[in-house]
Amino acid sequence: MIFSFAAALNFIAAFFFITGAVSLKEKTQENVEEIADLSKKQFHYVIERTMTEFLSPDGEDLRKEDSTIVAYQNLFDVTYYDLSLSFDMTGKSIDGELTMTAEPLSDTLGLVYLNFYDNMKVNEVKYTRNAVEDKTFETAVDADFKREKDYVIVELKDKPSKGLAFSMKIKYSGTPKTLGFDSFSFKTIYGNPTAYNLSEPNYGPTWWPSKDRPNDKALSTVRLTVPAGFTGVSNGLLSGTTQNTDGTTTFVWMNSYPIATYLVSVVVAKFAHWEDTYTSVDGNKTMPVVYYVYPRDSANARIDWKETPEMIALYAKTFGEYPFINEKYGMAQFGWTSGAMEHQTLTSMGYLLITGDARYEHVVAHELAHHWWGDCVTLENWDNIWLNEGFASYCEALWEEQKRGIQAYFDYMKKQDYGYFSGTVYAPEAFINDYRVYATVYLKGSWVLHMLRGVMGDELFFKTLREYYDRFKYSNANTEQFVTVAEEIYGQPLDWFFDEWVYKGTGRPKYEYSWRFENFQDQPNSGAYTVRLQLKQVQTDYDVYKMPIRVTIITEAGDREFTVFNDTKEQSFLLTVDSKPKEIKLDRDGWILKKVAKGKYEG
Ligand SMILES: [Zn+2]
């Protein structure tokens, strides 16, 4: 997912212009200075308020996992979700029917806990299990269920046996709740009604029941019945469209790759639709790249999104083939203002991000990259969110590098340094809808990969990404597993690196350096010079940030490059150059998140 601060600021600026202009004008006669101050404060207030409004769940905390319920949910593994939804676009409600098929992981499964908010009414639950003899489903029976908080709890009188599948059908209806980042919304945009979701991290249960845990992926079919003139789009391939006798249309989308519940997507709107093509790296397959856009934005989207096949090619070449090559990659405009969400095979793009000048091309790159990092290799739990967001943010820089060259890559990384990051990258202080940790997870997370590239070198770094992808694709991973792959490829421990940048450190090294030189001692007239570089780390958040540091000595005969490994708080390095040194630069290109100041030479 991405939330574009720039787009939000435009939105806020417009809001401020309307609400702020009147009060400011009245004040103009009084005191010009006071007004400057007032407008500044007011602007900050509006930003803060709007950020909080945009980025925080609406009055409801994120679900806290109850260990008893988690233990119950761990007793079964969902293999298939078949979800049918029909939309009342004027009444803003849905009728739903979910058939969930699962494998019991124990013989003691008597209660099935599914996450489902109580705004939705459960009308009926039917249950069936595989017969022991021939593994066919028995006749479905009504199952007892109760509603408790945000769960539907189904009681299984005939417990399924380990190794034999069971299935339940839940019929429900209601108006979905809009929580978090627009978990589910009915809106009218540019005069057209639309319905869409953004469930991350755990708001899927506001509109459909599931075992809503990112580490239980399943296959899925989504059937959307919508009024005449509307299109319903979702994950995977469109396997059929049916015109119903009541004038509605049913779109059936089948997803044949494992999907996490938070990535299941529905968008209903009146769409313009066109397609592009991607050819696989080995040249053997072509895949549709599909676009669904509000008609008035379609000309702009054709400009903004034209690089998409090229981007797929870049990431496929760099990490391994596009994971959902037998289906599609797509983007659908949706009613969220200024963000986007990497719904599997069908990214949702905020409607303000289509501008016709490719201003938000990095958002296109970001959401696409999530198809490797997040959708295919999915985080094991939300403590590992940087494995989604840090990786996708870093891929923006890789696209920049491909398109505009290596200097543009370094410049992009500099832009991703906000100067200050709050808390640790792993297990951040809050979820990413809290703007305080947005920068830490996304941007410092991106810097972690950039710095790892700096430590390992290009060959081993990209080999690590390819191996990590290959090992965990269509499955789940955690940070430790990524570290293990990196250490295997690097051939040396990297715990020091991940401790300081991901698990424990919350800041960055503050280097103070100084230097002197003298003629090479043994051969005063040899033309060689010895430079003594003194380096100190003066930050307080973390004792020593161990890092290899590139040192450039600018001499009369040109630049001379060195790499020193700094692993103590105060350290001296002796470096020999063949010409008179004039200046020293530490990490000139910007491989390290750092602050640098000149210190006093001691000695
Ligand atoms: Zn993202």
Image (cartoon, helix red, strand yellow):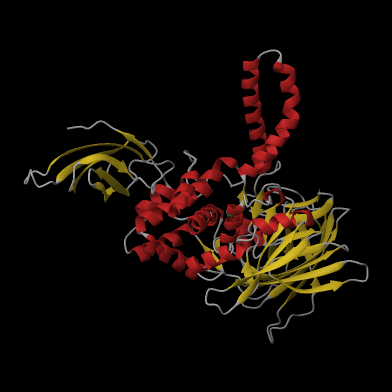
> Which residue: 65% across, 78% down?
164
Residue 566 image point, x, y percent: 28, 46
**Of all residues shown, which one is farthest toward the bottom?**
134
Left or right? Give the position of 523 relative to 488. Answer: left
> Which residue: 43% across, 54% down?
406
Count of numbered circles in the view: 0
Asked whether 450 or 283 is in front, the reply is 283
Find residue 195 and report its image quarter. Answer: bottom right
**Of all residues shown, which one is farthest toward the right?**
246
Left or right? Give the position of 529 relative to 36. Answer: left
Left or right? Give the position of 33 relative to 578. Answer: right
**Of all residues shown, which one is farthest toward the top?**
30
Asked whether 62 or 109 is in front, the reply is 62
Left or right? Give the position of 411 relative to 9. Answer: left
Judge whether residue 108 can be spotted in this image. no
Q: In the picture shown, does residue 9 fall above or below 377?
A: above
Judge whether residue 89 can be spotted in this image. yes
> Which residue: 71% across, 17% down?
27
